[in-house]
Amino acid sequence: MNQNNESEKVYGAVVLDNPNQIAHFRLLTLRQMLKLEMLGMKHSSGKSAYAMIKRELGLKGSRQSVFEQLSKMLGK
């Protein structure tokens, strides 16, 4: 805050401060990772987004099918 006790303005910032918001954002991130994997990009380390999504959400099928199922779950 500045010296006049006025709130500083922050533009373009979003605060995710509860577990549901954080979990939802994580799923959105995994969805985008899967989309990039389908275009041929690879994650730098660890498991693929495809494997993480299938394991955590119990989805089955091809990358495209899992992407579509996850998109439907997220309302995208």
Image (cartoon, rainbow, N blue to C red):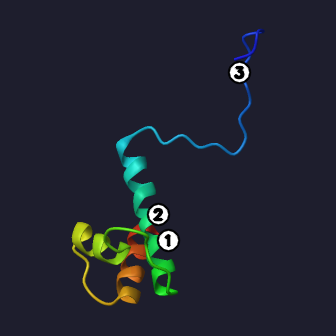
Q: Residue at x 37, y 53 (%)?
A: 23
Image vertical order of residue 56 relative to residue 48, above or below: above
In the displayed structure, would residue 26 be above or below residue 55? above
| Location of residue 6 in the rendering, given as x and y in whole percent from the top left corner | 74, 16
> How far apart are the alpha carbons under marks 1 and 3?
34 Å
Q: Give the image location of residue 36, x and y in percent.
A: 51, 78
Are the residues tagged 2 and 1 within 8 Å (C-beta)? Answer: yes
Which percent across, then down, holds residue 4?
A: 78, 9
Q: Secondary structure at mark 3?
A: loop
Residue where numbered disc 1 is placed:
32
| Amino acid type at mark 2 | Thr
Residue displayed at 35% across by 43% down: 19
Tell us which disc is closer to us: 1 or 3: 1
Q: Are marks 1 and 3 in contact (CB under 8 Å)?
A: no
Amino acid tagged 3 = Ser
Structural distance between the alpha carbons of marks 2 and 1: 5 Å
- Residue 2 is left or right of residue 36, and the answer is right
List the residue tagged with mark 3: 7
Gap between marks 3 and 2 measured at Cα: 31 Å
- The label shown at residue 29 is 2
Residue at coordinates 72% horizontally, 11% vertically from top-left? Answer: 5
Secondary structure found at label 1: helix
Which residue is at 48% across, 42% downward? Answer: 16
Q: Please, what is the three-letter code of the amino acid marked with disc 1?
A: Gln
On screen, 56 above or below 15?
below
- Image coordinates of residue 56 in percent, x first then y, are 24, 66
